[in-house]
Image: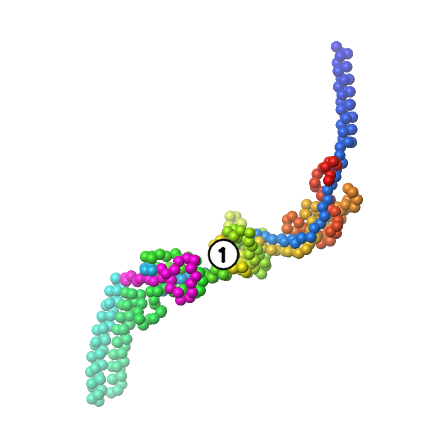
Amino acid sequence: MKKGVTITILIIIVIVFFSALYYLYAKNQAPSVVFKTEKPITKTIVKNTIATGNIQPDEEVLIKPNISGIIETVFIKAGEKIKAGDKIAKIRVVANVSNVSSTQNQVQTAKIALDNQEKIFQRQKTLFEKDVISANDFDGAQLAYKQAKQNYLAAKQSLDIVKTGTTTSLGSYANTLIRSTVNGMILDVPVKEGNQVIESNNFNEGTTIASVADVGRMIFIGKIDESEVGKIKENMPIEITIGAIENKKFNAVLNYIAPKGVAENGAIQFEIKASLQNNDATFIRAGLSANASIILEKVNKALAIKESLVQFDKKTQKPYVEIETAPQKFQRKDVVLGVSDGIYVQVKSGIKKSDKIKIWNQGLIAEGDKK
């Protein structure tokens, strides 16, 4: 029994010994690590940041009435081009009963006063012609008569305005026809026939009848995060991409950065504005969503390598690459880096275009797979 156990143990030891020998042999026969290389390229590198927003007219004019009433006729519709002075809508004034009654009483009172002053003036005129009263007394009576006559006319005009919204003596100052004040395109007509509108005055903004803008002068309005706002400045070039217009980019210039940020979703956002340079006259609709690529840095014809080829010294954190000096033999070269777009980085000095750079993080490649 003991002899059998001993033999079993010896057999196990022999198996383990030969297994170890085979493992060492197989390890020595494993293929060596073969590193691939890449050469630098010449390309334009652009470093940018993205802002989201939409397209709006540079100047949008809201047309408001100078009288209150009800829209009787609308002469335009959204999308039409219009010139200053063109008719937009006609308003029908709805008289307020209380105002009409009060104004009619004022007219009657002014008429009574006028009739009385006219009688006095005629008597004074007769006495003046007979040299009974002086010229000063006659002039006073004549002045009072003229004032009463003017008050009566003013009361009648007030009654006309209350009833119809205008009067002949006011000309274009008060008119039931609402006209455009600028040239441009009708963007929106928020009222319809039958809608009641309120006049624009010092106490009320008034009802907007139409909005007019020059669609040839569009701007991008967007927001940028506080982490990026310190990197931008006015007059920077921008590329605008509009979602509804595929395969096309529009050049723009950043001309406004808000001095104060607004908290949105836990982050501070700053408003920016940029003027579009639409050289080919592409029609851009107001309100379209867009993205703005703000060019922070740009270098043309730069000697560039992939960022993945760059290594950093563990102690100094300075960048370097490994240059192939002979087949699978590499030498460290310190480099000075420049602008990066996240994939490629500019190399200012340290390597040449003909150098072969080691792909140090590629992993193991079998010798037989080398091409």
Q: Quadrant of residue 209?
A: bottom left
Q: Is residue 119 above or below residue 211?
A: below
Q: Residue furthest top?
A: 1
Q: Residues within 10 Å of mark 1 (few under 14, many from 20)?
A: some
Give the residue at x 76% y 31%: 27
Q: Is residue 141 above or below residue 212?
A: below
- Which one is nearer the viewer's eye here, 263 or 25? 25
Give the residue at x 23% y 78%: 117
- Residue 268 is at least partly visible in this image: no
Residue named by callout 1? 284
Residue 116 part of the magenta segment: no
Give the residue at x 47% y 54%: 287
The quadrant of the image that shows the N terminus is top right
Q: Which residues are magenta?
A: 74-96
Give the residue at x 47% y 62%: 214
Q: Residue furthest right?
A: 326
- Residue 72 is at least partly visible in this image: yes
Residue 306 in the image, given as x and y percentages of width and height = 68, 47
Residue 23 in the image, given as x and y percentages of width and height = 76, 27
Residue 48 in the image, given as x and y percentages of width and height = 60, 53
- Left or right, 281 with respect to 205, comes to right
- Left or right, 244 with respect to 96, comes to right
- Which one is nearer the viewer's eye here, 9 or 294? 294
Q: How is the image coloured?
A: rainbow
- Left or right, 152 with respect to 370, comes to left
Residue 82 part of the magenta segment: yes
**Which amino acid is tagged 1?**
Ile
Q: Main secondary structure of the magenta part?
A: loop
Q: Quadrant of residue 82?
A: bottom left
